């Protein structure tokens, strides 16, 4: 029987127009809108899923990629359990901007150990002709960022969308286990003092 593990916050970041909203809609509602407009500010959807016999309540945040919304999206980085960076395989500029997105998240998310935080890279629109970023280039980028997982997706056809999100969930679940282990391994000094003071 699955156990309830609480709320898990996933943030999706990337330039405007790369398909962040479409990926979220495909995963949560299994829908795709050809005429989907740019996100204004921040939006989120909820979804309950079972991963490895554990029921997880996901809160997926889609943030506007345009520069003018930068101040609006930054407060929503806090409390994130996982971050998915998305670029458009047919637009090289969206790939070149990934380092800036990673730096922005690390600066404002206030995570304790950003180098080991669960990140995932998604190259979207694999169904569209005119590819500008090679698979090998994306993998090299991931190797330079602590071997973050990489998926090539299509929100339109649903290719690899569920797989990407499930991997994100497994990453953040593993990270939570590691964090709990660190706290479990700490020494309770007060308990030690009480034991020594006993007579």
Image (tube, rainbow, N blue to C red):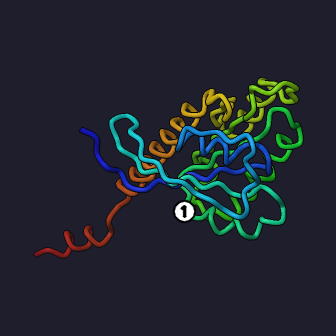
> In which quarter of the view is residue 75 placed?
bottom right
x, y percent for residue 24 = 60, 45
Residue in view at x 42 percent, y 51 percent: 57
Which residue is identified by label 1?
A: 79
x, y percent for residue 69 = 78, 65
**Where the N terminus falls, by quadrant?**
top left
Instruction: Count all numbered tags in the image, as a single digit.
Output: 1
**Label 1 crowding class (10 Å Cα cut-off): few <14, some 14-19, many 20+?**
some
x, y percent for residue 151 = 66, 30
Height in image: 75 above or below 116? below
x, y percent for residue 135 = 77, 24
Q: Residue furthest left?
A: 199
Residue in view at x 59 percent, y 39 percent: 31
- Residue nearest the viewer, comparing 83 with 23: 23
> In which quarter of the view is residue 173 placed?
top left
Height in image: 68 above or below 120? below
Residue in view at x 21 percent, y 73 percent: 194
**Where the C terminus falls, by quadrant?**
bottom left
Q: Is residue 189 left or right of residue 96?
A: left
Q: Is residue 141 left or right of residue 26?
A: right
């Amino acid at each position: 029987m699955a156990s309830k593990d609480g709320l898990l916050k996933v943030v999706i970041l990337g330039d405007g127009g790369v398909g962040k909203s479409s990926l979220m809609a495909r995963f949560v509602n299994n829908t795709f809108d050809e005429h989907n407009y740019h996100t204004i500010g921040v939006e989120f959807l909820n979804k309950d899923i079972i991963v490895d016999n554990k029921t997880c309540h996901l809160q997926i945040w889609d943030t506007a990629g345009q520069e003018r919304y930068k101040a609006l999206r930054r407060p929503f980085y806090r409390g994130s359990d996982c971050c998915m960076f998305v670029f458009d395989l047919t637009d090289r500029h969206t790939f070149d901007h990934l380092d800036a997105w990673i730096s922005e998240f690390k600066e404002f998310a206030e995570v304790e150990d950003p180098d080991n935080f669960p990140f995932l890279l998604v190259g979207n629109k694999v169904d569209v002709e005119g590819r500008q970023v090679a698979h090998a280039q994306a993998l090299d980028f991931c190797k330079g960022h602590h071997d973050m997982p990489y998926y090539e997706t299509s929100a339109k056809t649903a290719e690899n969308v569920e797989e990407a999100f499930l991997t994100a969930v497994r990453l953040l679940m593993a990270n939570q286990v590691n964090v709990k282990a660190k706290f479990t391994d700490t020494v309770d000094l007060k308990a030690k003092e009480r034991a020594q003071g006993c007579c």
